[in-house]
Image (spheres, rainbow, N blue to C red):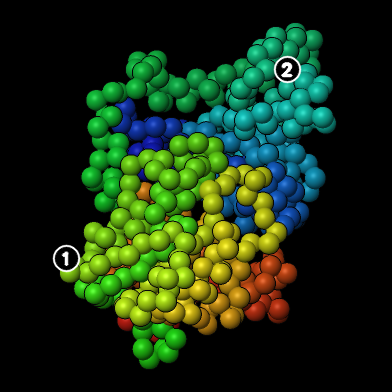
Amino acid sequence: MTSIVTGLQGQPPHEHPKGYPFVAGRNNVIACAKHFVGDGGTDRGINEGDTISSYEDLERIHMAPYLDCISQGVSTVMASYSSWNGRKLHADHFLLTEVLKDKLGFKGFVISDWEGLDRLSEPRGSNYRFCISTAINAGIDMVMVPLKFDFVEDLIFLVESGKIPMARIDDAVERILRVKFVAGLFEFPFTDRSLLDTVGCKLHRDLAREAVRKSLVLLKNGKDSKKPFLPLDRNAKRIFVTGTHADNLGYQCGGWTATWYGGSGRITIGTTILDAIKAAVGNESEVVYEEFPSADTLARQDFSFAIVAVGEEPYAETPGDNTELVIPFNGADIISSVANSIPTLVILVSGRPLVLEPWLLEKMDALIAAWLPGSEGGGITDVIFGDYDFKGRLPVTWFKQVEQLPLHIGINSYDPLFPLGFGLTSTKENSSD
């Protein structure tokens, strides 16, 4: 994902000095690489948890993307709430200063996370001057302080009393000014309002739709490998669409959309899966929709096939921590009841693999991991009706049971439901890498 840096900031010229921030012009914005470092490897995946590893593994696995970001001129790096072997990243001088700034040559500025300093004491925010001195001396250059506005007075006291060297303040200010000059904030302190109409324009939505269809992973296509279920017939006489996620834009988008934890319903402009199906089918096709399938509807014998969209409700950070990983809203029951009566395609909308019991997997005719497709549901109908083939591959191992987690490729007990890199196409039985 490090290529997003040049997408935001622009492509630095070949002669651009390594480690220095770069912003191409007023149509670009500064990027932030986060969260440094290892928050994707915490024990049991717990948010703000502890990454337990050797330095060699931390560098090889978790630090590697930052080398890419720095080479692209990333302007800022955000420290992680998480810890490394019990040491809070916001207080880790070795990683923030000796490694990130000195060894890797990062010349932009390091920013704290929201109330990141408060987490350096228990209870949070107590002994606040200790929190400030520890973080600033560790290498934090800019502090995200949403509420404690006495921060400045405390910082001045710590400098005047010698707890924070003036040289550390000078270094932080130099780094912050460097990024602001590079971004042109002194010449142009306000946004260019002429760009407003560009946001969410057709070009952007077309690109988002392309991203959706390329990221979908086809996990099952037919109960018999010789008789693929997909692509579906867009001219089928009658199609049943159901599930909690079939007509819910907020659920498609997930967390960090419009609000911190995301939301339900029409939270923004976009196309739901149901919208997309209605737009994609033929003029003679009838689409019957129910969020929850009724007994009367399931008793009908006139559906060509069903499309069931289920998955997770939006979440972010700690509320997303989950040790069960079952499909919410009785998703398995919805799939089961529909698949008992109608040939069924299941579209799973989630931020991660969820439990798929063998009996449930056997019932469905086809299964797609749609992840969080966002606002452009048309990317899903692009592939299920055969306008494009599936290209997505699993970026993670899909477990059989949560008791297997963490499940890493290459270990003797590696026994996944679907291996890392797995993905079918409509034309081949299996195209896993």
The reply to whether residue 103 is visible in this rendering is no
Question: 298 or 11: which is nearer to us?
Answer: 298
* Picture quadrant of residue 326: bottom right
Residue identifier under label 2:
165
Quadrant of the rendered image containing residue 239: bottom left
Say whether residue 280 is left or right of residue 351. Answer: left
Residue drawn at point x = 47 percent, y = 57 percent? 244
* Residue 352 image offset from top left, x and y in percent: 56, 60
- Other residues around mark 2 within 10 Å, as few (<14) / some (14–19) / many (≥20): some
Q: Position of residue 22 (x, y in %)?
A: 41, 33
> Which label was assigned to residue 316?
none
Q: Secondary structure at mark 1?
A: loop
Viewer-proximal residue among 277 and 70:
277
Label 2 SS: loop
Location of mark 1 (residue): 283
Kind of residue indicated by mark 2: Pro
Height in image: 103 above or below 58? above
Q: Is residue 122 left or right of residue 409?
A: right
The answer to whether one can see residue 193 in this image is yes
Image coordinates for residue 170, horizontal then vertical, percent: 62, 17
Q: Nearer the viewer, residue 288 or 168?
A: 288
N-terminal label among 2 and 1:
2
Residue 392 placement (x, y as % from top left): 41, 67
Residue sitting at 32 percent across and 65 percent down? Answer: 288
Asked if the residue under mark 1 is in contact with the one under mark 2, i.e. CB atoms within 8 Å, the reply is no
Judging depth in this view, the residue of 355 and 14 nearest the camera is 355
